[in-house]
Image: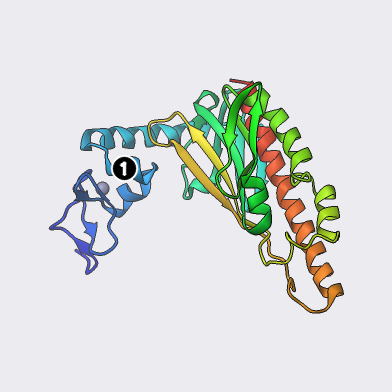
Amino acid sequence: MGLFSNKKNPCILCGEATPRIFAREACGGKLCSDCGKKISMQEDILAGISLEDLRQHMKYRDENQKLHETFNDTRTISFEGEKLVIDDKQKLFYLTSFAGKNDPIFRFDELTGFAYIESMEGKLEQFIASKKLFLKGEERIVHERGVRVVYEYTKDYKEKNDSLLELYKEEYHGVAYSKNLLNHVLGLDDAMMSREKPVKQMYLVFEFNNPYWNTYRKDVLEPVVRNYNDEDKAKRDAGRREYIRIYENKLKDIDKIANAMKSIFDAQ
Ligand SMILES: [Zn+2]
């Protein structure tokens, strides 16, 4: 028995010794590091799960491991250093961002929603917050303060939301398409770019109908405007141009992910 393992608190699943510090906990007990690593589910679901359901989950994880052996990737889309991998024939996909080996594989029909969201602050935030969208006469989205949904697809709304994106391009100076944004930024209106982070947060949300994952949020690293408060206008403009270039590249990647998610909805 090692100095850092604890036989007095055996793993509730397999009975092996658990780590003395940082042992993963579930169902009121502790888990050994092997069992702990094998679990892949949302923390709030894990918090309410029964021991029997947890045992079932371990079987599910073994099956998931086997599924990786027959998984035949037909498309791989890289983004933010991670990957979305799709098997179009078996209608399966996984995201590498779930960490560790044995990433959870989802069936196409388990995907229930996808969105790319940006949040802003300052004047632009108020401008966006004042907007409401009505599509086909019904109120689809009431914006929270400073939050905009650039892409949103769900089982029921995928067609509507193509037009939602079109609407954004017109309404918000085409923030999804940076030529207009570039005009906006290099124009006289300094409201948006006279801060370090014009877009405060950028993130993807994946929603599933799956016993262990309802929502998975993937944060995108927001670019910053260098020299945004420099006295030298040439330096400020150079910082803005650099920002636009980085932002544009991120959106190109996000656009690929959004199109792939839409194709998964279309194939359900
Ligand atoms: Zn164990």
Q: To which quarter of the image does residue 121 belong?
A: bottom right
The colour scheme applied to this rendered structure is: rainbow
Task: Find residue 27 and report its horizontal and vertical position in percent.
Answer: 21, 44
- Residue at image position (71%, 51%) is 250
Q: Which residue is mark 1?
A: 46
Q: Residue at x 38, y 31 (%)?
A: 211
Where is residue 41 drawn, in percent x and y?
Answer: 39, 41
On the image, the x and y values in percent for residue 5 come to 22, 62
Above or below, 216 against 25 in this view is: above
Give the answer, above or below, for where 28 lies relative to 8.
Answer: above
What residue is drawn where x is 21% and y is 38%? 51
* Disc 1: CA contacts within 10 A as few (<14), some (14-19) or many (>=20): some
Q: What quarter of the picture does the C terminus occupy? A: top right
Residue 133, by quadrant, is: top right
Label 1 CB, ligand 1: below 8 Å? Answer: no
Relative placement, left or right, of 195 versus 140 is: right
Secondary structure under the numbered disc 1 in the rendered image: helix
Q: Quadrant of the N terminus?
A: bottom left
Of residues 146 and 4, the one nearer the viewer is: 146
Outermost residue on the bottom side: it is 231
Can you tell which quarter of the image residue 153 is in?
Answer: top right
Relative image position of residue 120 (x, y in whole percent) = 63, 54
| In the image: residue 176, left or right of residue 218 | right
Looking at the image, which is closer to me, 196 or 249?
Answer: 196
Q: Amino acid at mark 1?
A: Leu
Please indicate whether residue 26 sits to the left or right of residue 66 in the image.
Answer: left
